[in-house]
Amino acid sequence: DVKVTQSSRYLVKRTGEKVFLECVQDMDHENMFWYRQDPGLGLRLIYFSYDVKMKEKGDIPEGYSVSREKKERFSLILESASTNQTSMYLCASSLWAGGGGYEQYFGPGTRLTVT
Amino acid sequence: QQQVKQSPQSLIVQKGGISIINCAYENTAFDYFPWYQQFPGKGPALLIAIRPDVSEKKEGRFTISFNKSAKQFSLHIMDSQPGDSATYFCAGWADSWGKLQFGAGTQVVVTP
């Protein structure tokens, strides 16, 4: 079974802190994604990566950055946390399929609260 | 701007009933439409998916109906069970975008 793990289930940080969310997948997937999930807004893509050291902006990248130094690990960084970044953060991974339409495997999520 | 609009936001159905969730999309380049199911405390998981060259796909009690001309698709859960209580997300994918666009989600509660 594909396993996507996230470093924390719950995290509480203060405004202005630098926050690191870590994600690791064990299936040698090329693609990795970071989403945030908010009630009534569904899942919104923050950043994604198709390869090591490669990153692409998603729909809501402002206030976030990412790092992918190894194929299995994708980190989301909040440079200076703000209260409007309080949310559930979901990491996902998938195989690369040139024809499109592939399954994304999600981690359990990290609920981040910024006070 | 939401590329995929999903309704209703929530749904309560009795055990044995039919749950219906509707989605409408704008991007005609979408060529893959998955549905994801999310239980509380878990990440979403792929439930069923369809491509626009077919009008219906059925897997067990779950059926996707697809209407390409109307740019709409729906999920039907037949004989709904309490274990189906979850949040369901529809999504659209286009190769030119390289990413999934999700709907806002529907919380389904199946009462015993």
Image (tube, coloured by chain):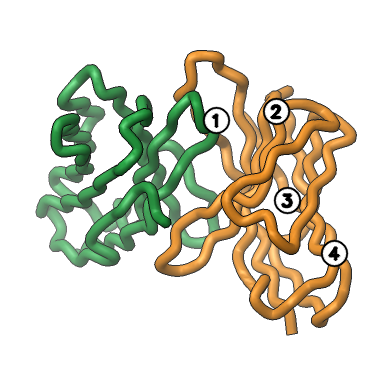
- State the mark number for residue B98: 1
- State the mark number for residue B24: none
Q: Residue at x 21, y 26 (%)?
A: B57
**Residue A112 percent coordinates (x, y):** 69, 70
Q: Earlier in the sequence, mark 4 or mark 3?
A: 3
Q: Chain of mark 2?
A: A
Q: Nearer the viewer, mark 4 or mark 3?
A: 4
Q: Earlier in the sequence, mark 2 or mark 4?
A: 2
The tint of chain A in the picture is orange
**Label 4 crowd bin: few (<14), some (14–19), many (20+), radius 10 Å:** some
Q: For the residues labelled 2 and 4, say whether their Cβ atoms are less than 8 Å apart.
A: no
- Which residue type carries mark 4? Glu
Q: Nearer the viewer, mark 2 or mark 3?
A: 2
- State the mark number for residue A6: 3
**Residue B14 percent coordinates (x, y):** 13, 62
Front-lying residue, A73 or A85? A85
